[in-house]
Image (cartoon, rainbow, N blue to C red):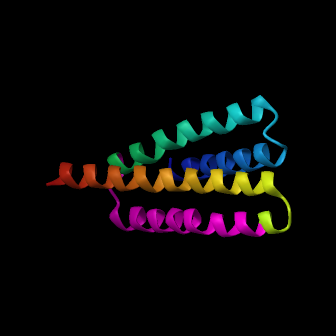
Amino acid sequence: MLLVALAITTAAAVSFFAWACRGYAGIWLFATAVSLTAAVLFLLPAWTLLFRTGAVLDQLTLWFARLSAGMPILAAVLAIIGELNCAGGALIASGLFGAIVSVLTLSRRIAFRRSR
């Protein structure tokens, strides 16, 4: 379940980035990205609440936090070279990763309280 959620996360981030780089056109690509995001925001907390593996969850949170912090740097590089639409896509992907960090942190707290 975790690998499926990570694959869906990748597909959602790439879909948002591609949608933005195409000039925010193509409602089908945006709809795909939003639906994949909704699936990820359901699967990752469900996995956390079912399996409660602390070390893996800490590592996932750290990775997504690094991705969330690194994407604005990529956006700045893209903006400098003139790819403003793609820079917006990088910022959207950064927001997606930040939302995933928030959901993972919240589900970790819920799992910790349930285990007491």
Q: Whole-percent x and y of residue 77? A: 76, 70
Q: Is residue 81 above or below residue 10?
A: below
Query: Which residue is nearer to you in this view: 97 or 2?
Result: 97
Q: Which image quarter holds the C terminus?
A: bottom left
Q: Whole-percent x and y of residue 45? A: 40, 46
Q: Outermost residue, left direction?
A: 116
For residue 14, side relative to residue 95 (left or right): right
Residue 69 forms part of the magenta stretch: yes
Residue located at (76% from left, 30% from top): 28
Residues rendered magenta in the picture: 50-77
Residue located at (41% from left, 49% from top): 103
For residue 99, side relative to residue 82 (left or right): left
Q: Whole-percent x and y of residue 91? A: 65, 55
Q: Looking at the rendering, which quadrant does residue 35 occupy?
A: top right
For residue 66, side relative to residue 112 (left or right): right
Residue 33 forms part of the magenta stretch: no
Q: Looking at the rendering, which quadrant does residue 31 occupy?
A: top right
Q: Looking at the rendering, which quadrant does residue 29 occupy?
A: top right
